[in-house]
Amino acid sequence: MVAALKEYPDLVFEGHSSDYQTAANLAKMVDDKIAILKVGPSLTYAYRQGLFALAMIEREMFTGIKPLSDFIAVLEEMMLNEPKYWEKYYHGSENKKRLARKYSFSDRSRYYLPVPAIEDRIDVLMDNFKDETIPLTLLSQYLPVQYQKVRAGELDNEAESLLKDVIGVYVDCYLQAIKR
């Protein structure tokens, strides 16, 4: 089909769900005139990944000091109480389903992130980091890419900046593909 497209220079394809492709594969898709690279789960996956990392750091920094967000536990509880967005997609043992709810590339957790109870936990998580500097050792442990950028002076050691950068790592693959 891609070969046939070359006979029509004014047409392009849309690459639906191009998530999790390597930068090289995305570049090949662009070369093949798949000009619209739709992104979905990978960006919310990155957002969830960053939130989980911050929640782990929060637990290390503030246990016994501040009320914790319990973001990971509250998200899991919400998903268990309202399984409609994931139960048709995750199969296997209870342990496999538990892991999928947290870490699956299909990222069904994205349907729960806008729920007020989850948004509240995200707000608590982010508020806990206001006016706090995350120790470099914790950044290195839980956000190693961002740790390198903070050390190089390329990124502020601030929770919102760190979270945006986690998402930006995924976006960068797409930018590399189209900017060649």
Image (cartoon, grey):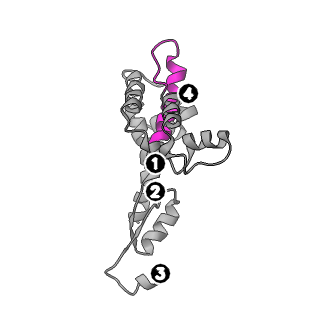
How far apart in space, not on screen, are marks 3 and 1 (Cα)?
31 Å
Where does the image place residue 76, in percent across and percent down from the top left? 53, 33
Q: Is residue 144 above or below residue 22?
A: above
Label 1 near label 2: C-beta < 8 Å?
yes
Q: For the C terminus, which image quadrant?
A: bottom left
For label 3, the residue is 1
- Which label's residue is closer to the chain start, 2 or 4? 4
Type of residue at label 1?
Val
| Residue 175 shown left or right of residue 143 in the figure | left
Magenta highlight on residue 56: yes
What is the residue that sits farthest to the top in this orientation? 64
Type of residue at label 4?
Thr
Type of residue at label 3?
Met
Q: Which residues are magenta?
A: 47-70
- Which label's residue is closer to the chain start, 3 or 1? 3
How far apart in space, not on screen, are marks 2 and 4 (Cα)?
27 Å
For the residue carrying disc 3, how many other residues have a C-alpha within 10 Å: few (<14), some (14-19), or many (20+)? few
Label 4 near label 2: C-beta < 8 Å?
no
Label 1 near label 3: C-beta < 8 Å?
no
How far apart in space, not on screen, are marks 3 and 2 (Cα)?
25 Å
For the residue carrying disc 1, how many other residues have a C-alpha within 10 Å: few (<14), some (14-19), or many (20+)? some
Q: Is residue 79 above or below residue 74?
A: below
For label 1, the residue is 169
For label 2, the residue is 173
For the residue carrying disc 2, how many other residues have a C-alpha within 10 Å: few (<14), some (14-19), or many (20+)? some
Judge depth for marks 1 and 4 and give the one in front.
1
How far apart in space, not on screen, are marks 1 and 4 (Cα)?
21 Å
Give the number of the disc on residue 137.
Answer: 4
- Which label's residue is closer to the chain start, 1 or 4? 4
* Badge 2 element: helix
